[in-house]
Image (cartoon, rainbow, N blue to C red):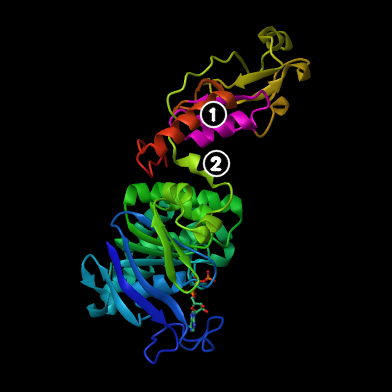
Amino acid sequence: MIRFEGVTKRYGDADSGSADGGSRAGGGGDQGAVAVDNLTLEAPTGQITVLVGPSGCGKTTTLRMVNRMITPTSGTISVNGRDTASMDVAELRRGMGYVIQHAGLFPHRTVVDNVMTVPRLLGVDKRQARARAMELIERVGLDPAMARRYPAQLSGGQQQRVGVARALAADPPVMLMDEPFSAVDPVVREQLQNEFLRLQSELGKTILFVTHDIDEAVKLGDQVAVLRVGGVLAQLAPPATLLADPVDDFVAGFVGRDRGYRALSFAAAPELSLTDEPTVRLGATAEQVRAVGSPWVLAVGDAGEPVGWVRAAAVDHEVTRDLLHRGGTVASTSGSLRALLDAALSSPSGRGVVAGDDGRLVGTITAAEVVPAIEARRTATTAGEVPEGASTR
Ligand SMILES: Nc1ncnc2c1ncn2[C@@H]1O[C@H](COP(=O)(O)OP(=O)(O)OP(=O)(O)O)[C@@H](O)[C@H]1O
């Protein structure tokens, strides 16, 4: 567990101890400005704690005080009960992986050499360090063939994966991550986030994660700390609580307008009775499609997996992939209420497709059938019957 106890950072102090000196925007000019104000916070072991807030609210400063790149003006930060101020800095940092935006890779070292850096510094034998590095490269979802490339020969998303692999190489119990996925496009960012969650479910690190993106915070965090400018903690809560019950106007404004809808992500889909949906296989004839007797017909693949809706009137000969309607989402029986509603709303037939965990079609559901479940949940939540923060992640 990482614990901040009354931690304040005021830049411009004689002992500011900032590793990056005054190089940041406003550095040197902000004499005496409070960047973090009396912060008390616990980041539990094995969980992801996200620090989120507007630009300049002290997120990076908070993170860098943990590995002592920045020295707090007052207060204490402890890791598993040990005051970090009394620890040897090298020892402290050995236990902490650090990932930053743009990955911060060494440009003249290959990918595998980048990942091996810390274990080699720690004296791990070269062959062993290389084997471990290759394992991590695969684990973060990179093709092993990329190990011999240089960072400049990788995409931004691939570089970020290398950055994560490098931070994990010494198997540190703690990971400090400063906007690690911000520099890539939204599609790649989502892939990185999903891989990161998968990795964390295997590794169970204690993670402090900085982002300015509330959607990322809510998706990744077991708990989310919202900071306001001046480095004051506005609210610390699990994502579902943050969305359902922001403490004040600042947090409400920061988490955004569609929070009621987004909160449904954290509500597990209840067991609703689904409608049996008649289907056709890819390759079915126009007659078979019309025999279903519905303007929109659901097509399935060989394993019974839904592949898309087809407009019956558009099938002249047979159902081919290019006739399938794009854009409908598929909900999972073990997914969230939001996914169910979204499947219904995005379906051209108005019938949301629901598949089991094995990917096979289970049935369909309309938005009108999902809404009572949402209503029931709201009533139960108001009555205090649903545990807050129930997550379907
Ligand atoms: N070295 C420095 N010297 C003086 N002031 C600094 C220094 N570094 C940061 N600050 C100031 O401290 C405040 C908090 O900065 P910090 O970088 O921690 O915020 P942040 O929330 O990470 O911002 P962003 O999201 O824009 O990266 C800001 O007002 C910033 O200008």
Precedes in sequence: disc 2 or disc 1: 2
In the image as oriented, which residue stretches furthest toward the front?
383
Residue highlighted by disc 2: 261
Residue range (magenta): 328-355
From the viewer's perspective, tell me whether residue 205 is left or right of residue 114. left
Residue placed at 51% from the left, 89% from the top? Answer: 28
As drawn, 382 above or below 372:
below
Report the disc number at residue 371.
Answer: 1
Q: Secondary structure at mark 1?
A: helix
Which residue: 42% across, 42% down? 393
Instruction: Provide residue 315's location: percent of width, then percent of height.
Output: 75, 17
In the image, 255 versus 147, the foreground residue is: 255
- Whether label 2 lies within 8 Å of ligand 1 gets the answer no
| Quarter of the image that includes the N terminus | bottom left
Q: Residue at x 42, y 53 (%)?
A: 221
Q: Nearer the viewer, residue 240 or 320?
A: 240
Q: Is residue 358 magenta?
A: no
x and y, in percent, of residue 244 in the image: 46, 46
Q: Rounded to the nearest whole Å, what is the CA distance between mark 2 and mark 1?
A: 12 Å
Closer to us: 369 or 250: 250
Q: Nearer the viewer, residue 232 or 312?
A: 232
Residue 310 image offset from top left, x and y in percent: 69, 22
Disc 1 marks a residue whose amino acid type is: Val
* Ligand 1 within 8 angstroms of badge 1 C-beta: no
| Residue 73: percent from left, percent from top | 35, 83
Secondary structure under the numbered disc 2 in the rendered image: helix
Residue 69 is at least partly visible in this image: no
**At label 2, which amino acid type do we have?**
Tyr
Queried whether the magenta region covers residue 338, the answer comes back as yes
